[in-house]
Amino acid sequence: MHHRRTKAATTTSSSKVSASRERRARRKLDGGATNGCHGDGGGKGYGARVVLLAVGSIVLGAVILWGGALHRVTTTTEAESDGDKGGNRVLSQLGKFPLPKGMKRLRNSKIHKPPPNDADIFTDIMKDDNNNNNNNNDNPYNPAALATNPHLGWQPPLLPSPLGYSFSWRVCFRADAKNDGSAQPVGCRENPDEFGTAPPPPLNFVTDSGEKIWVPDVTMVRTMLLHGMDIDGNVFPPPLDEELCQDIGVTGGKSGDSNKECVREANIRATGPLNATTVTISPSNHYGESIVDGEAIVVPAPRIMCLVYTMADAHGNRIRAMRDTWAGGCDGFLAFSTQSDPRLPTISLEHEGPESYDNMWQKVRSIWRFVGTHYLEDFDWFFIGGDDLFVMPHNLKTYLASLVYKDGTDPVTKEYFVGRRFNAGGNDYFNSGGAGYTLSRATLRRFLENMDDATHCAAHRQTSMEDVMIANCLRHLGIHFTDTRDAKGRERFHPFAPGTHLHWKPPGPGQPRDWYEEYNREWGILQGKDCCAPDSVSFHYVKKASMVRHMHALLNFCDLNK
């Protein structure tokens, strides 16, 4: 009996265990439902969950597909596979990095992808972003700054081309180099009508005589570049399309791009991003020095003010193109024109004699006087050139920092006269005005003290040869040019466009003499790919605004091996 009771008890216990296991298994199938949600009711809950899961998967898949399509629409164009139709991907002006938090997307029919910016740009100005700190210390367009400069953060609108995705930058190259942009198609960013009327400049400075004048904020373009956006939240500098990396001839054709050929063959590139506050120098990379392989010393970037002389009809195309590309690489930028526009900024100064090319010397004298009066202590170096000059500011800073490091000097106290030296014969040495030249602060100070010397500094002479005049004056003061070639004898400052230098040949027998060869006879001219140093600083005769953008893309962003 005891054995049978034990067996019966065991059988009952096994049945209970089996039932318990079955209930647990059913609850698992029902998604772990409790409180009576098992048995028949649990099966119903499970079925509902399967339906919901299926619906959710369908919705999620649709969202992913929609997001991918949206991403493609907003980052590419129909012309991505056809370079002649333009468009393509957007090129960042500062590097391939994600947009910082809070930056707005730029929207128009041509450009949808917000160009990423160099991460270093926001190291200081957005250092509190992780804490969501949006106070005025992080925003350069705060009330105090705008009270001083109400036009800080302005840029002209990027108007969409009516052609949409079929718009090509190539059409912008077809216009004559001397055009004012008024006939250029929308999308070329050259039409002066896009500017509207220039506002009157604010009279923000009182002279010793009590006269109220305008002294421009020359740091505004640099401030905008460092911030990465304009006052309305649009990207600044404005993005460039990948089409500008293609072969584009001077009139927009698909062949004959000698400028790109030179950039590729001579391996000319920017030595760093526009927003950099340091430069990496090689003090041995100077003519006459024995170059040290692998030499790389990081030093603070010198402060440079870039000065451009121009006319009012170039504001909407050439000056705008400079502002949109390389100008922000200068710590200060100011164009001297026949009309003042505080938005750019440009300023019109009075000078002795008429406003004409044949009186360029008097215009340049007024520029140096104004700059020396108001900005002398703000910058280490002062670079000047015309509105058909293309400049690589980071390369200029790198070279100048390397020069003073090599010499163990300071531009505040050491007199330097830097550019592309020429010799017109005898002792007539000067730096090419076309290639642009640079004065150290000490040199500008000495010139200001002596510029009214009529005998040695041609104080009242009216001539186009401003570069010869200032060289004569500085030579009288004991200030001579600096040989700016690299260790291999390649030039850094160039009086012509890249393609011209690449293909230049001396005149053959019976051909007319070439002034360029004559002016360089003392040093000789390296030909072909050795024409230009990889860290070249400037190129002259880049007259078209479209070519400025093309050159800027080639030298900063494009993969030239494609």
Image (tube, rainbow, N blue to C red):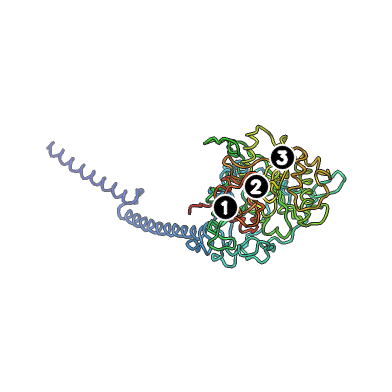
Disc marking residue 480: 3
Residue 144 position, x and y percent, is: 73, 46
Give the amino acid type for the residue marked by disc 1 in the picture: Leu
Q: Residue at the far front: name it.
A: 510
Asked whether the viewer can see residue 470, the reply is yes
Residue receiving disc 1: 502
> Neighbour class for label 3 at 10 Å: few (<14), some, many (≥20)?
some
Give the amino acid type for the residue marked by disc 3 in the picture: His
Is residue 176 placed above or below 548 in the rendered structure? below
Residue 105 position, x and y percent, is: 58, 55
Residue 73 position, x and y percent, is: 50, 61
Secondary structure found at label 3:
loop
> Neighbour class for label 2 at 10 Å: few (<14), some, many (≥20)?
some
> Neighbour class for label 1 at 10 Å: few (<14), some, many (≥20)?
many
Labels 1 and 3: the sequence-earlier one: 3
Residue receiving disc 2: 520
The answer for how far apart the CA atoms under marks 1 and 2 are is 16 Å
Secondary structure found at label 2:
loop
Q: In the rendered view, does 548 fall on the left or right side of 205?
A: left
Give the amino acid type for the residue marked by disc 2 in the picture: Asn
* Callout in the foreground (1, 2): 2
Labels 1 and 2: the sequence-earlier one: 1
Labels 3 and 2: the sequence-earlier one: 3
Of 49 and 233, nearer the camera is 233
Q: In the rendered view, does 54 fall on the left or right side of 234?
A: left
Secondary structure found at label 1:
helix
Label 1 with label 2: CB-CB less than 8 Å: no
Of 23 and 419, nearer the camera is 419
